[in-house]
Image (cartoon, rainbow, N blue to C red):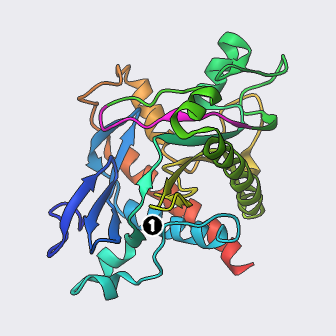
Amino acid sequence: MNPVTNGVPGLERVGQGKVRELYRIDAEHLLMVASDRISAFDVVLPELIPGKGEVLTGMSMFWFQRSAGLVLNHLAGVDVAAAVPGAGPELCARAMVVRRLQPLPVEAIVRGYLAGSGWGDYQRTGAVCGMPLPAGLRQAERLPEPLYTPSTKAGQGAHDENIDYGRTETLLGSGLAARVRELSLRIYSELSACARACGIIIADTKLEFGTDEAGTLYLIDELLTPDSSRFWPVEAYQPGSSPPSFDKQYVRDFLESCGWDKTSPPPPLPAEVIRGTAQRYLEAQRRLQGVAAG
């Protein structure tokens, strides 16, 4: 069952993204619900991944708590059951009560390893998003230091676009742009070390920020999930090839093998790809629960 398919009774839906939906609780608070939808190459696929919304919410809550000493986040400290009368266990497991904030028009991407579009960029140009790197790096190699490579935020069906740091200064102002970059690199460095201790390499990740009316900066949306990050098992990591993963790379690999042109409609996902994706997300969550116990 996917509780957000027909909305949340009694609440007005005020926003819908590729995966998440937003419902108005009051003037200051929203209910953010993670569905079982999955997107690839900025296209929402018609199939659902069972249990995915619960994994995304559980992992985000864990990391928001873990990073609370680094940056404020949008969690309001209110239980879903207390804010939404009649909310059942399925909704509570995939929802968060969050502050109503203004999202920044920039996605903060941090890359610690040479993978995905960054690897393709490096092969063509010797750089990633215009930032030169040493010659001779291999696929999946750890970078000399993490790179901050922001992008614009695309709407549903559109593609994100990499932008240089100067463009973020234009969009955000120099002070806020510097703060977002600094925080993004620090969050990645500290939390990826925690994940590695649990057997997961976070190769790269996407962070999102927002501000309140006073201009205070908050971390929002999701944090270090298999949807927003590239997760590799430590024991299978080997530079020079694409490692197995606990994220939606499994779905991307299938779609690439079909020769899809990355526009709607996408090819249907076979049952084994749906099952395999759900299993990978659950394995990522299982491994990271070891951090909480440590």
In this rendering, would 149 be left or right of 218? right
Residue 156 part of the magenta-drawn span: yes
**Structural crowding at the residue carrying mark 1, measured as other residues with C-alpha within 10 Å and reported as few (<14), some (14–19) or many (≥20):** many
Looking at the rendering, the stretch of residues picked out in magenta corresponds to 147-157
Q: Nearer the viewer, residue 214 or 279?
A: 214
Q: Nearer the viewer, residue 142 or 175?
A: 175
Locate residue 23, reporting x and y percent. 26, 66
Predominant secondary structure in magenta?
loop
Locate residue 118, reporting x and y percent. 64, 27
In this rendering, would 216 be left or right of 236? left
Q: Quadrant of residue 237?
A: top right
Q: Nearer the viewer, residue 187 or 52?
A: 187
User: What residue is at 67 percent from the left and 49 percent from the top?
Assistant: 179
Q: Is residue 2 visible?
A: yes
- Report the residue that reaches farthest toward the front: 214
Q: Is residue 1 visible?
A: no
Helix, strand or loop at disc 1? helix
User: Which quadrant holds the N terminus?
Assistant: bottom left
Locate residue 178, reporting x and y percent. 68, 43
Position of residue 171 relative to residue 46, above or below, is above
User: What residue is at 64 percent from the left and 30 percent from the top?
Assistant: 165
Position of residue 113 relative to residue 240, above or below, is below
User: Which quadrant holds the C terminus?
Assistant: bottom right
User: What residue is at 29 percent from the left and 41 percent from the top?
Assistant: 45
Question: Which residue is labeled 1 in the image?
Answer: 57
Q: Nearer the viewer, residue 145 or 136?
A: 145
User: What residue is at 49 percent from the left and 59 percent from the top?
Assistant: 220
Q: Amino acid at mark 1?
A: Thr
Locate residue 238, reporting x and y percent. 77, 38
Q: Quadrant of residue 135?
A: top right
In this rendering, would 160 be left or right of 191? left
Q: Quadrant of residue 21?
A: bottom left
